[in-house]
Amino acid sequence: MATPFTRVSTISDAQRHLMDRGARLGVVGRTHAGSIDHPAGRPGHGRRPDGDPDDENFNPDGSRKERRERKPEFKVELLCRTFAGDAGLRPLPSMVFWESPDIVIEGPSGDPDVATPGVNNKVKVHIWNLGLADCWSAHVDLYWCDPSVGITPSVANAIGSKVIPIASGQHSIVTFDWTPVLLNGGHECLVVQVYDPVADPLVAPFNPVQDRHVGQRNVSVVQLAANQTLNFNVFSQNLSFTTSESVIELQKIEGEALKVLALSMGRDGWEVAGGTEVQLTRPALVHPAPHAHARELITGTFREALQQVPGMSERRRVMGVMRELSATAQDRAVEPIAARETIDERIDDPSDALETDTAAGKDSRGMRVRLPAGRHVRMSLRASLPATAKRGSADVWRVVEHAGGRITGGVTIILQAK
């Protein structure tokens, strides 16, 4: 039975605003233009706040000094972009964050963004230093994961790590060798973390919404013949200690949204193939095992990052978000869900089961899933191209996860006619 989907032809107003701000950047990493807050001085403050002893950027009467009088803030600001025009402003609003333009696959087949499993592929990572200080030890860590709507360190497999210098206001491309495994036909998610452990450490590992150091590319290009059917596995996991509830939505990307995606991939765009036959199967509980070839990076990425003690203001913000999420989870936990079924027979406790609800009116965006703590689920996207699809045309589908009113993850699948 076909799964209802949402046609998405425009980008959100928040993303449009961020792209406009990024487009007004002058010399990359040196200064901001227009209405952008300047890296020198206290951004967003026209006058010195009460009790603020900052005499370097404010006059004795509290007024802000002229731009030429402000003292620049010399620091390293590394960035792996999340979208075209990304200027490193974080946190991001609720938007698609897994289509980074700074991660590119060059497979031996010659087709861009198409990886060939079992042989060596090139992955190029574009990194930026937007700060006014040179960075002499920019760590670039590259990982692959199974296509999942939520990516965490627990499901990541290291590809490699490199350390390079990058001057102030400069950008560089780092190349990695990668041999995709045959699992999922070589279609994997790539995650990059670029940071300086001392001068510019990670803030939120594997979280591009909160951390400009993290880039995620969960985009798979699949070439199909007309009338050929694709079965694409997508995973989701709940790694918390409590039951989670999310909504899985199926989207078809068209119009302006498709042009923005093509821009992030360095393409001119695709002609829409016109397929509408698509099905997202019911989630099934699985018990994944670590891949035998997974290895740890030599550099202690997370050890170095997690030893950093956040400032008081950052700690307050983090605790505020955690309290808000906890309250949201408690409110939603009491809502009844009609359908209940144990998907995996290996679950010993009958009450520890996966719950889904696809009944009309429960959630207009898609399928609602309540997942027990520590569980993984697998879904399969089944889609095909129509017989009238022209060579080179494509249909773009997104599997998007919503939780707490925000987009929390997703996968983008591009079906291209060959």
Image (cartoon, rainbow, N blue to C red):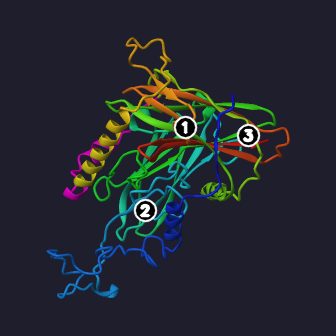
Mark-to-mark CA distance, 3 and 2: 36 Å
Instruction: Quickly name the residue at label 2.
Output: 88
Please state if 99 lies on the left or on the right of 165 as rendered. Answer: right
**Residue drawn at the location 17% of the way across and 87% of the way down:** 60
Residue 100 is situated, as x and y percent measured from the top left of the image, at 53, 52
Residue type highlighted by circle 1 = Gly
Task: Say which of 298 and 29 sits in front.
Answer: 29
Indicate the quadrant containing the N terminus: top left, top right, bottom left or bottom right.
Answer: top right
Residue 347 is situated, as x and y percent measured from the top left of the image, at 42, 14
**Residue drawn at the location 30% of the way across and 40% of the way down:** 326
Residue lying furthest right: 388
Mark-to-mark CA distance, 1 and 3: 22 Å
Residue 315 is situated, as x and y percent measured from the top left of the image, at 23, 52
Instruction: Quickly name the residue at label 3.
Output: 276
- Image position of 19 with respect to 283: above or below: below
Mark-to-mark CA distance, 1 and 2: 38 Å
Residues drawn in magenta: 294-314
Q: Crowding at label 1, few (<14), some or many (≥20) Cα neighbours within 10 Å? A: few
Task: Say which of 367 and 106 sits in front.
Answer: 367
Instruction: Quickly name the residue at label 1.
Output: 361
Check residue 414 in the rendering and tell me which mark sits there, or answer none.
none
Indicate the quadrant containing the C terminus: top left, top right, bottom left or bottom right.
Answer: top right
Q: Is label 2 in a helix, a strand or a loop?
A: loop
Residue lying furthest front: 361
